[in-house]
Amino acid sequence: MGSLRKTLLLSAAFLLVGTAVAQRSGVLLGVAGASSNADGDTQSFDTIHEPQYQTLWIARDASGELKVLATLPELIVPRQDGFWHVGVKQLCEFDDFEDGGNERLRQVVWAAPATQSATVEQSHPCVAHKPEDYAPPYTRSEQDKNKISQCGFELVNLLYLSPEIISMSTYTGQSEDCEARGGRYNVDFKVRNFDSDEALSFGQLLGAKAHDAYVRALPAMGQGDGGEDCGESEETRDTGWRIAHAEGRWHPYVHQDLGYFGCAVDAPVKIPLPASLTGDVSSAFDWKRLQSLQSKADPIADVYVSPAGDMLIVASHSETRFFELRAGVPGKLLLTLPSSGIAMAQWATGGHVQDWTEKVSALAKQHLPGPVVRVKPASN
């Protein structure tokens, strides 16, 4: 009888622990690995590569320990019809000229349900050539006049991802062989949805008050790389904007590219992004409660708070730490990971944690299909 009572007590304790664990939060964290870095080596097409991303599913295991339970390539985002994967594909396209033609690189965003291939359209794909078939476009000898040049690239980075929208940047530039003066580059920012590459208007997406806030946020003049005034902003155009995380929240910023040499305007817009767009319903965090975690050698850059208020992610320049959170106060350190650029943080709470654990773990065991490139038919 005593043995049976002991067994029942142990079973009850296990159920209570299991229930408590099930109520704790889990986070689907999308991070950037190798990015399309405009400051990197872009003097040769061989050194330019598409950016890499991965998604970490972080939740407690059966013993209650917080762990990375699954790692998946690309960005995996929960949407109304299930999980989708999002990434960037690099394409080489050929422009036919009388003097031999030119190859250029273009990076494009793709998105599809996680178990399906996205379709990426391409015009005039490059074909394989020998190294001796290429030459810079200028100061050519008579022998090289019909060779192929490699000029022009568009480098894309995914900055933010939610179940509804994608914030991205596009760096357009040339190598020194194609633009010896240097500095002639552009950086465009835009926010788009999953179905179209078209830039979303800030006002059309969020309403007339949002458009007014966008206009109020616009600096009158753009500034270039050297801090010089370089051009006037455009009040009638509100498709230039980006989303970034700061002080524990996702915020919108106006960004208009006004010309070469980094000429642009960039400023925060004082209007909150609705949870219907971001999927983030967490409350604001009191930064004064981070004093005990601060380090002069590695200061805190940002924080992410679970909607249930039970987990705090603290990001610094060298590491990302996960803390237990009780009544808004950071407690036990649960997990430490190397620092990485966070492009997505989607939370699951309650019974959804176990559901996501099962579904994301199943996806991690599969070979998720990459994008399929479809060549556009030649126009007459």
Image: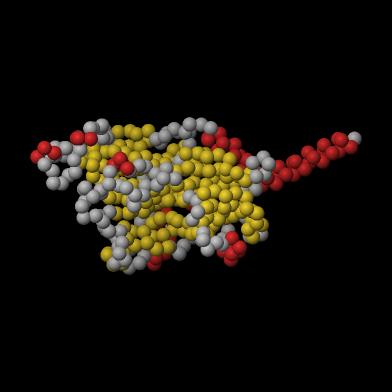
Q: Is residue 145 above or below residue 241?
A: above
For residue 27, say whether it is visible: yes
Q: Is residue 183 above or below residue 119?
A: below
Q: Quadrant of the C terminus?
A: top left
Q: Is residue 275 left or right of residue 142?
A: right
The residue most toward the right is 1
Q: Is residue 196 above or below residue 364?
A: below
Comparing 183 with 363, the one in front is 183
For residue 274, say whether it is visible: no
User: Which of the 4 image quadrants contains residue 45?
Assistant: top left
User: Which of the 4 image quadrants contains residue 110?
Assistant: top left
Q: Is residue 106 left or right of residue 295?
A: left
Count of all numbered marks drawn on residues in the image: 0
Comparing 352 with 56, the one in front is 56
Q: Position of residue 93 (x, y in %)?
A: 26, 38
Q: Position of residue 314 (x, y in %)?
A: 55, 56
Q: Position of residue 273 (x, y in %)?
A: 48, 57
* Residue positioned 62% across, 50% down in the render: 334
